Amino acid sequence: MEKRRVLVVGSGCEKIVGFLREKGFDARGVSRAAETAGAAEAAILLPSVGEAEARTIAETFPKALIVTVGPNKLEGALHFEVPLAPAAFLQSFSSALELHERMRALEGENDRLKAALDDMKIIDRAKCALVRYQNMTEQEAHRYLEKTAMDRRLPRRVIAAEILKTYEN
């Protein structure tokens, strides 16, 4: 299993970076947001990180789990107060990271299903156009779309869009 990449930002980050590495994370520490580079699944922002800097990091890593520690809170971020019990932090952080990954997977699935639904709408409109203007049955229109897409090695959506362009203008 690949190690989860975690970025720890703020002065004095060495201790938490060492702790996370001991627990199997690919942790990297930087003192300022300007030093952030590469990909990270999570970013832990220590108390020395200001609000503007925290926003910059959240924008730099839009798909990462953002965790704030100490007095600074950031909307949409997981927040921990200090002092932290290491075991409680690790359990909460690991659970939050797992949930965050599941949410991202569900968002991806949702996007895929929305795209498929949009494709179906366009294809159905194209079939209706063929039925109306070419006097085809629904089955003939379906077969025409399928065969044309296969013959031209194009997605059905592209063929449907061409049909709609022809008949709906």
Image (spheres, rainbow, N blue to C red):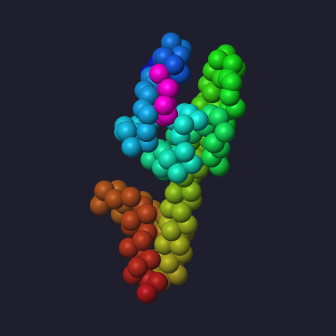
Q: Residue at x 66, y 39 (%)?
A: 71
The residue at the far left in this view is: 152
Observer able to see residue 58: no
Q: Residue at x 64, y 17 (%)?
A: 86
Residue placed most toward the observer, 165 or 58: 58
Residue at left offset 52%, top offset 81%: 132
- At x 50%, y 66%, the residue is 123
Q: Is residue 9 magenta?
A: yes
Report the magenta residues as a range. 6-14
Q: Residue furthest top?
A: 22
Is residue 78 inside the magenta stretch? Answer: no
Left or right of residue 150: residue 50: right
How far across and how far down the image is residue 133, in percent? 47, 83
Q: Looking at the picture, how far across and down is residue 102, in whole percent?
A: 60, 36
Can I make out residue 59 in this image? yes
Q: Is 131 placed above or below 100 here?
A: below
On the picture, is 115 further left or further right than 70? left
Q: Is residue 146 above or below residue 83?
A: below
User: Please, is residue 30 above or below residue 125 in the view?
Assistant: above
Q: Nearer the viewer, residue 91 or 157?
A: 91
- Position in image of residue 46 (x %, y %): 56, 33
